[in-house]
Image (spheres, coloured by chain):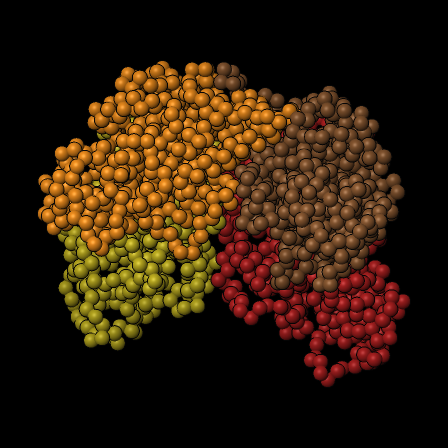
Chain colours: A orange, B yellow, C red, D brown
Amino acid sequence: MDSKQTLSLDDIKAHNSPEDCWIVVGEKVWDVTDFLSVHPGGSEVILKYAGGDATEAYNEIHAPGMLEETLEEGKFIGDLLPSSDVPPSSTIEEAVEAENSPPRIQTKAQVPIQIPHQVPDVYEKPHLHSLISAADFREVAKHTLTPKAWAFYSSAATDLVTYTQNKALIRRVMIRPRILRDVKHVSTKRKILGCDSDVPFFISPAAMARLAHPDGECALARGSGNEGIVQCISSNASYPLSAIVKSGKKDQPFFLQLYVNSDRSKTAELLKKAAALGIKGVFVTVDAPVPGKREADERIAAEAVASAISGAVASNDKKGGGMGRLMAQYVEKSLIWKDIQWIKDVSGLPVVLKGVQSAADAILASEFGASGVMLSNHGGRSLDGAQPSILVLLELHRICPDIFDKLDIYIDGGFERGSDILKAIALGATAVGIGRPYLYSLTYGQEGVEHITQILKDELETSLRLCGLTDINQAHPGLINTQDIDHMVATSSAHPYIQWRPRAKM
Amino acid sequence: MDSKQTLSLDDIKAHNSPEDCWIVVGEKVWDVTDFLSVHPGGSEVILKYAGGDATEAYNEIHAPGMLEETLEEGKFIGDLLPSSDVPPSSTIEEAVEAENSPPRIQTKAQVPIQIPHQVPDVYEKPHLHSLISAADFREVAKHTLTPKAWAFYSSAATDLVTYTQNKALIRRVMIRPRILRDVKHVSTKRKILGCDSDVPFFISPAAMARLAHPDGECALARGSGNEGIVQCISSNASYPLSAIVKSGKKDQPFFLQLYVNSDRSKTAELLKKAAALGIKGVFVTVDAPVPGKREADERIAAEAVASAISGAVASNDKKGGGMGRLMAQYVEKSLIWKDIQWIKDVSGLPVVLKGVQSAADAILASEFGASGVMLSNHGGRSLDGAQPSILVLLELHRICPDIFDKLDIYIDGGFERGSDILKAIALGATAVGIGRPYLYSLTYGQEGVEHITQILKDELETSLRLCGLTDINQAHPGLINTQDIDHMVATSSAHPYIQWRPRAKM
Amino acid sequence: MDSKQTLSLDDIKAHNSPEDCWIVVGEKVWDVTDFLSVHPGGSEVILKYAGGDATEAYNEIHAPGMLEETLEEGKFIGDLLPSSDVPPSSTIEEAVEAENSPPRIQTKAQVPIQIPHQVPDVYEKPHLHSLISAADFREVAKHTLTPKAWAFYSSAATDLVTYTQNKALIRRVMIRPRILRDVKHVSTKRKILGCDSDVPFFISPAAMARLAHPDGECALARGSGNEGIVQCISSNASYPLSAIVKSGKKDQPFFLQLYVNSDRSKTAELLKKAAALGIKGVFVTVDAPVPGKREADERIAAEAVASAISGAVASNDKKGGGMGRLMAQYVEKSLIWKDIQWIKDVSGLPVVLKGVQSAADAILASEFGASGVMLSNHGGRSLDGAQPSILVLLELHRICPDIFDKLDIYIDGGFERGSDILKAIALGATAVGIGRPYLYSLTYGQEGVEHITQILKDELETSLRLCGLTDINQAHPGLINTQDIDHMVATSSAHPYIQWRPRAKM
Amino acid sequence: MDSKQTLSLDDIKAHNSPEDCWIVVGEKVWDVTDFLSVHPGGSEVILKYAGGDATEAYNEIHAPGMLEETLEEGKFIGDLLPSSDVPPSSTIEEAVEAENSPPRIQTKAQVPIQIPHQVPDVYEKPHLHSLISAADFREVAKHTLTPKAWAFYSSAATDLVTYTQNKALIRRVMIRPRILRDVKHVSTKRKILGCDSDVPFFISPAAMARLAHPDGECALARGSGNEGIVQCISSNASYPLSAIVKSGKKDQPFFLQLYVNSDRSKTAELLKKAAALGIKGVFVTVDAPVPGKREADERIAAEAVASAISGAVASNDKKGGGMGRLMAQYVEKSLIWKDIQWIKDVSGLPVVLKGVQSAADAILASEFGASGVMLSNHGGRSLDGAQPSILVLLELHRICPDIFDKLDIYIDGGFERGSDILKAIALGATAVGIGRPYLYSLTYGQEGVEHITQILKDELETSLRLCGLTDINQAHPGLINTQDIDHMVATSSAHPYIQWRPRAKM
């Protein structure tokens, strides 16, 4: 891409309406008039910067190459005249180069446009090696992320019942360790959707990793490659899919999490690109046709009502204007069972349904051709009150035990310890998704990703040895005592004693 | 009504005994000697002001038109001579006009007699649009209501066990969301006691809404009309029934909550007036032949012992002199099953029994001709230790499942979220009553009423979509996992293993 | 009793050894040499004051007449010479007169020797009529009792598990109120061990009421008489039995709680006196052959190690020197089942076993001739970990339901509300013992006793009405939902699945 | 041993490499080059002090005689020249003498090299006799131990779930006391692995007692002898086994806890020495082939990363460098069932497996010739999430009740009260191990050991009397109500409803 012309801010400021909208990003000027209607985050956010400089807001969320990838080339208007009182920043060229060539954005020096973190002076970020658990990373993230990023990552739906119970019920599952086995050598290797993984867990997809670190999902990719784990990339990643994949090693396996776009052609395009990039499977999110009500996230937006920036959005919308709601605007609300086959056909990839919350839907997933299901309630972010995922895993055993022969069974939500992972595997899960802990680890970039992986792997190895196991694949339900939560497991897809059914009142 | 004469305070002060009692309200002088014995709140409260000005105490509780409606015209003595050091206040005429014509008391300017709120300076009431949940409204109410009003609204019986468990058990009910349905369009419309409602919830009756806002129940009525919901008006409303109904739109449906008066003729009169006003149904309160012991409420009264105002009441009465006790003095303690027919006969309206707490009484309700029951423990305000209403709903399924074909089943107590409402509907409730959240919303007047309604409706729509439902009427028990509380549900109207029955000891 | 001589402190101080021990109490000098070995509280406490003035320590625990009643007349040595710098105090004569004549010690003026209360200046004791619950009385007691008295009354065994669970499990029992009964009139009258009582509860015995108020048990007696309730008098009362009984009205019913003395003749003497005084029944304590370990109580003693007063006791005794331990020194540890008959024979009174904690022992109680059992764990003061008394009540229904035809079933431990009492009665209890709340009410003397009684009675009446009952004797188990605790109720006297029995290891 | 030569620090400092490593300990110079590779705590800790003075670090952990016992005599190089600015310290001779003769290191004066305690000035250590419970000792230890020692003793694995539940579930077990037995005399005597003990509990092995008191395990031995209890000595004791045994009385029984060394010859040597010293049984630890992850302990090490002392260890090791991990480096990870026979053969002693956590392994223990099992999860320090030991005890009754005829059943983890001990014995345990409370008692040396023993014994005697028992051997399961936790007890060695077994995924 070449500069066509050089413009001053004065040249731009007249293009400030929905009918004629230019913005500056990274000292380049773009015509985004046509893009307004298809922006996943809605037009209003862009219009705030119409005829002006949107660089800071852009960089907080999006990777450098994202704009060039999204807009047609003709929308590039020209370069902004350098201003003497503005420090030099990275150029779009660098970002595009990063996108189109092997990743080089590995160091801070290469991404000079820093996201300003609103860290209070008093907090001293601890040295990475003093962190010894996932909880430690959460604590650091709480203090070092911007309030908006912390709210977006950590929030869950309304009263946090499901979020809290996800973890609480895993902790109420007990282990019955066995003794006196030779556990000198121990293996945690596992096949995950046909891919080799050094561990029986993988990175659950989460949006907008750039909020935690400039390298965002690329840092996750590099860390995953070094540690032998699989990353499931979010549809709402900060970086383009290709940039993320290319950040990894040759043949490093990736999965793609998919929000189907209400414009299906965009989804078809994405799936084809994913297949071309060697993605190994598609995790279709099915538990969020609309986003859950994450109050911490929405409160941040509500607080901004008074400011000029997001006021219009929030004041028009009783549903809140948190990032979760904003990013979900393009998501297809009409996705139905038969669309699974369409996704398989378009992508040629195995499909896993992410967000299955009942045995009844696991059975349907098998009938409709899914390769697996992910028992998930979106980390408690979707419908508050939904049963914790560990209960769904047990429900499968109660209601449809043969499903374990037909589908891969993935699970996430509240897993933070090696022993948590062992419990799920022993109860029949294929692998466990780890979400927030990886986002939190990103506050240390790639090194953090590797460190949290090593911690979890070490915890898992220790747990295996202390259970008398030498291979994660030996884990079996006899090692587990679930009796403290068994009474909460549904025993049929109907209610056990309520015969009432909706009738005339409909 | 015309002024008969003009009096000074000196002219009045001799009329200060039970045998000869005049009071000033709103610069008008009234002879309330005969009224003392029938005042629902007891005579002692009035006698405090005998021969003096009762305006402030009156306005805190009662609507402007209430006095004229209650007293015969001959009891109006005359106008009070205006005092130079008293600011001009609204005149009784204005209030009466409000009562007898389409409501105009919609703005603060029209109700200049402000209730003085004892708000500490430090609390800044947040902007309405920054409130995103019922809990937010409670927090604001806690800080902006007068201590007396907060105590009256928020209090519950003795140790708050039932109050607390009402909500806790709803939260322990889990949802099993279904996936991959087309949920683009969703309907929350519901028939409630034959009336069309935009939502499957309605405003539970609560006394003395004027404590929260000068417009009191009229603001609830106007908000209900705008949002398409049904208001159930309390017998102890601050405003006359006609004023409230007339505040609503044409054909806007209302229910009337009824405390039967120990003077049955007064009840008959009220019921006839209700029928004439187009009220759609009568919710007879059956769980409070006497008021529960609400200690926060009574403590406010107890603290006032030392002051001249309410000292006499409290010191003579071991039962406490809280507002709950005061207002219940006229309530009939001898109401029995056969009176249901009398209420139906007099009013010609369907009758719902509010406060049913066992399957046994739901069965009797059906036999004695009720159209519905409201499973309620008075929001935990009646008998502390009474089982939470969600348990009673489940008890009906266990003991008398066919009752759902015979009666409408309403429920309230602790419902604060759209997902709470969905749980009840899926378990067979016809609609859910929402009480305290609406009182708290009144701290923002009519706008608050509309805002909380929109929040609840949005939460409910989101919950429906996340459950794979497109219409609230599709909700069914298979979506719900109640197993965490099933052990607490009674399985018969007798005790399951105790054979002991009262005998000689009687 | 006449003064024999007048002595100065100098005359006395040589009599300061176990072999020759004089002490001053209330300006009278006594030879307690022979008494040392039989003092229920042990000799060491007395020896602290050998040859000196023990008045203050004596008055803190004992009533004025106690010493004269206990010692033979010959042990009175003479009067102490009045000292100019000591304020005049009540004379022994007055105290003796109080013992031997109708009680006159009803006013503070008559008991001028005040117990010094170590109340911090900041606490302002609230007016009695501002107290509206038993919990309010506890709060006042906590602030106004001496630390020693508070520790003695409020303490329970070791980790307070039984103490805490006593109350918690009562609260987990739920009520199923019935509706639409005529509850205008309501009766709480009940027969208790053949006596008429206005309420189905009575004052559980508790030692040393004088720690809370100078009038001690006499105030309880007068209050009971006025309120129509029965007082069960502790063996360890501060006042002589006769003084307490005589404080009551004519024919006012009393029970006697009995610790059998290891010197059985003393017990026989006490029982005969009780019968002569018209006591209606004997509650033999069977759950405390040794006192439980009440750490708060013992800690007070342990803290005193350093001081000269109780140092010797504490440092010699790993079992702690709290008041509970001290007072139990005389208790017979060899009391066995056949002794029940002996107590009946000696007293001619019905016997209730206080402290039955299993169905097995309730059955034995019936076989060995008891008239009733009191399900009690000594308010959690005896063996920590013992099952809460409400579980024992339910255990009787599970294991030996016919026991309710054979015995009166009393219960105490954690009952603080009218609704608590209703639960027990509905589940088959004859009456409920109320212990600590009455001790706490004594901080207001007789008036406090009457006020707490009225509160409990009002709460009970309200509960009856709200349950649709007009007479406490109508209460039945169908009103109660115990399902939240039913899983904790033992179903047999053996362990349900453990077959192991002690064998060779014995 | 004679001094060979006298050296200055200058003479030593060149010997500072792994190939030539001298250190000073207690003014004596040793060549530890060959010892580096076999040091249980790893070589790096020693190399920190290569060519310098290691006295302080040595004394914190090791007893005076430990070095002489471990090294061959030829490794002693000579004495260090006394430095004028160094205070005189105990000589190695004294320590050796202590090792080779009857113990004399009974007073502080004899162990002048004090461990510096980092106690904040504000905490005043209470007088021993003011302590009345195990919890009191923990509180003192928390304030008086060094942070490192407190972390090492008090820590448990990861989230402390098992640690917390160990105690919580014991507390949820209820007692059903029996009444009216003659309990004047009571016996707590018990046979433990064939040895006479005054009580049915013994000192559970715990490493490095010297961290709490200079006399370490020797103080435990002397206290045990005086109180008639059995001490189980840790493999990782601070003092040599012989020194500890010789600290006790003649014929005082001891057990040896064994970590099998990956160099089996060392273990054989230890077992032969134990047999020769009269040790009565071997408790082989089987629940810790690798140490659990005790985060409090590891955090202390992580904090030290920055310092020169332990930096190298921690920064190389993601597994953390806490004392638990360091001390476990020599432990055999390949110990298997048939090794039990080898231990029996080598030692000629009965073998108990410490750390059995399932009925399945208790059965195997019996088949492989163990004399007993100790139901233990290492005090919650091994695998977090492992079921509490009281559940394993109940599991044995459910799954293999005849095991109580075949094996002694020991148990530990969370037992802190006499009543806790009674519960276990009544449920079939042979004896209960008490771990941390004894370590905490060591903050008062031998006197503390005796005091905590007397407290526990008194609590147990009180509990027996209050249960109507006169001998601990009469305790039976009918006294116990376990119903509040029965639902958590596994009923088979398989999972009760999960049929899934690991298959192709392996």
At 56% from the left and 50% from the top, the residue drawn is: D307
Q: Inspect this view and state whether residue B281 appears.
A: no
- Of B480 and B83, the residue lying toward us: B480
| C320 left or right, relative to A191 | right
Please give the count of numbered marks on the rendered protein. 0
Q: Inspect this view and state whether residue D314 appears.
A: yes
At 77% from the left and 47% from the top, the residue drawn is: D77
Residue A186 placement (x, y as % from top left)? 57, 26
Residue A85 placement (x, y as % from top left)? 22, 55
- B9 up-or-down from A56: above or below: below
Residue B464 placement (x, y as % from top left)? 30, 31
- Of B441 and C394, the residue lying toward us: B441
- A286 up-or-down from A127: above or below: above
Q: Quadrant of residue B360?
A: top left
Q: Quadrant of residue A449?
A: top left
Q: Residue furthest right?
A: C19
- Of C318 and A82, the residue lying toward us: A82
- Of B200 and D423, the residue lying toward us: D423
Q: Quadrant of residue D406?
A: top right
At 35% from the left and 35% from the top, the residue drawn is: A218
- D141 up-or-down from A268: above or below: below
